[in-house]
Image (cartoon, helix red, strand yellow):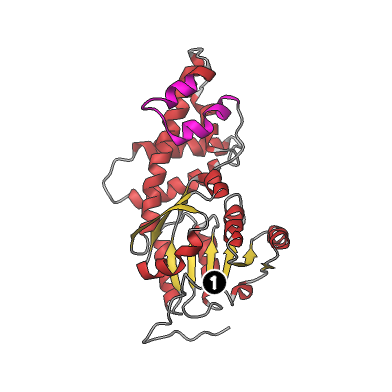
Amino acid sequence: MERRALSGARAPLINQRNKQMKVGFIGLGAMGAPMARYVHAKGLLTAVGNRTQAKADALAAELGVRAARSAANFADCDVVVLCVSLDADVLENVTALAEVLKPGAVVIDHSTVAVETARRCATLLATHNIGFLDAPVSGGVEGARNGKLSVMVGGDADVLDGVRAVIETYAARISHMGATGAGQATKAVNQVLVAGINEAVCEGLALGEKLGLDAEKLLPTLMAGAASNWFLDKRGATMLRDEFNPGFKCAHMLKDLRIVSAIARDTGVRMSTVEQALADYAELIERGQGESDTSALITLKRGG
């Protein structure tokens, strides 16, 4: 399908107050599906798509919306939200959407990808007068299920204003971080902190086990002081029971850390925490724990 790139005056951005706004959602995994449900709860969801067609068909039937089988099924959408895994997936979807979305539409990408990937997507869509926001999220599966995600956005502020009502359906905080790529840069910083906290918590709790401390006393004691953090609160008890049902998979953490490493390579910043975390999550995947929650890291820290 041939599309003419627009020049001169831009098509007006969609209006967030438009009650008839149509939203498509691509990527219905552990985070994407609950996010799409929140969009639907506000009466905005029109179509859903997923690489595994059965997932799209099931959610579409549940919510009474269209199950997309190609990019063309999103052609009438004002906004398309992406929540997929890899840079290649984002680029594939954006390339297809560029050929079918109407001028003035907006693509919101909640995936975690490289800064350069975000910029490529924005440039590609801009030739068709379609807006783009790189808007990675933090908060894990719990944040998605509870509609309490933190969203870090790169792109044009006017584009964000036009689609804020969509993001607000599943976000506790929306932060405009700057131009295209700033959202992904912020997520890189976020993942450095997350990786470091994971390393420290797993090492600390492994030490507590070796010292014979009572977990039922240890965990609330730690949470009441300066060691308190989200990972300890949400994963401390389960990891001590060797329960690693994924909130955020080890394989996804390794992918994100490789992105972080590439972003940081030329900054001159010492990244010893990231280097250790890269080695640890690579080892976990070699042990067959790629689909386990990142708290499976404690199995390495226990040694032996």
227 in the magenta segment: yes
Instruction: Note whether 29 is above or below 249 in the view shown.
Output: below
Q: Which residues are magenta?
A: 218-241
Q: Residue at x 40, y 59 (%)?
A: 153
Which residue does the image show at 45% across and 55% down from the upper left? 136
The answer to whether residue 207 shows anywhere in this view is yes
User: What predominant SS class does the magenta segment belong to?
Assistant: helix
**Left or right: residue 296 compared with residue 172:** right
Nearest the eye: 59 or 183: 59
Vertical comparison of 86 with 285: above or below: below
Residue tagged 1: 19
Q: Residues within 10 Å of mark 1 (few under 14, many from 20)?
A: few
Q: Image quadrant for the N terminus?
A: bottom right
Position in image of residue 104 (x %, y %): 46, 78
Q: Secondary structure at mark 1?
A: loop
**Does residue 242 sit above or below 1 in this rendering?**
above
Q: Amino acid at mark 1?
A: Lys
Q: Which residue lies at the image location 50% right of the left edge and 39% below the top edge? A: 282
The percent position of residue 182, horizontal first and vertical second, equals: 35, 58
* Drawn side of residue 178 relative to residue 278, left or right: left
Asked if residue 230 is among those painted magenta in the image, a careful observer would answer: yes
